[in-house]
Amino acid sequence: MKSSTTTVLVAAGVLTIAAGMAGSVVAASYTPHFAGSTGSSVANCPNIAWRIGQSPDGSLHGMMWYTDMSGTSEVNGSETGAGGQFTLTLKSVMGNGPVGTVRGQKGKGATLTGDGCANATFKPMVVNSYGGGG
């Protein structure tokens, strides 16, 4: 059987639901990690918002989207070294979502390098909180 992934955008955030074989629904458990929004470093581009959590296995997952709702992307990554360094990969899943790579360090900041408007600096990305921005 074929499995599918459905992404639903909710006004208060983003919810990802994975539908597996035989129509069962699996919701991943994760710890909130990064949240917020920042302006693109490219002129005349919308802000970029994100919600990213950490799975029990340590991997990072979530969503990034343009605040003008022109596109949403799936985010996957991991911590890449001691001291909280991490790398995230963005893949567009709806509309013209941001595509690129985020490299950074928890509590310090991060840089998104990608296609078109998907270029930004997050200073710092919020850790373990949904209460602020970068």
Image (cartoon, rainbow, N blue to C red):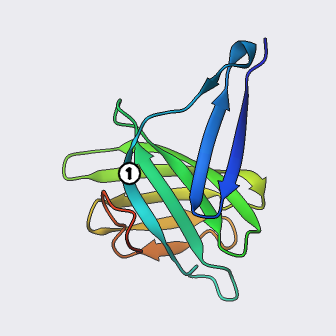
Q: Is residue 101 above or below residue 79?
A: below
Image quarter where the C terminus lies is: bottom left
Give the total of numbered labels: 1
Tell me what residue is drawn at x 67 percent, y 79 percent: 46
Residue 93: image location, x then y, percent = 73, 49
Residue 122: image location, x then y, percent = 42, 73
- Foreground residue, 1 or 14? 14
Horizontal relation, residue 4 to residue 15: left or right: right
Residue 108, quarter of picture: bottom left
Callout 1: helix, strand or loop? strand
Q: Is residue 45 above or below residue 109?
A: below
Q: Amino acid at mark 1?
A: Pro
Q: Which residue is mark 1?
A: 32
Q: Is residue 40 above or below residue 53?
A: below
Give the residue furthest to the bottom: 43
Tell me what residue is drawn at x 67 percent, y 20 percent: 20
- Foreground residue, 75 or 115? 75
Residue 112: image location, x then y, percent = 51, 65
Give the residue furthest to the left: 83
For label 1, the crowd category at 10 Å Cα-Cα, with few meaning under 14, some 14 to 19 and many 20 or more, is: some
Tell me what residue is drawn at x 71 percent, y 14 percent: 21
Residue 113: image location, x then y, percent = 54, 65
Tell me what residue is drawn at x 34 percent, y 66 percent: 126
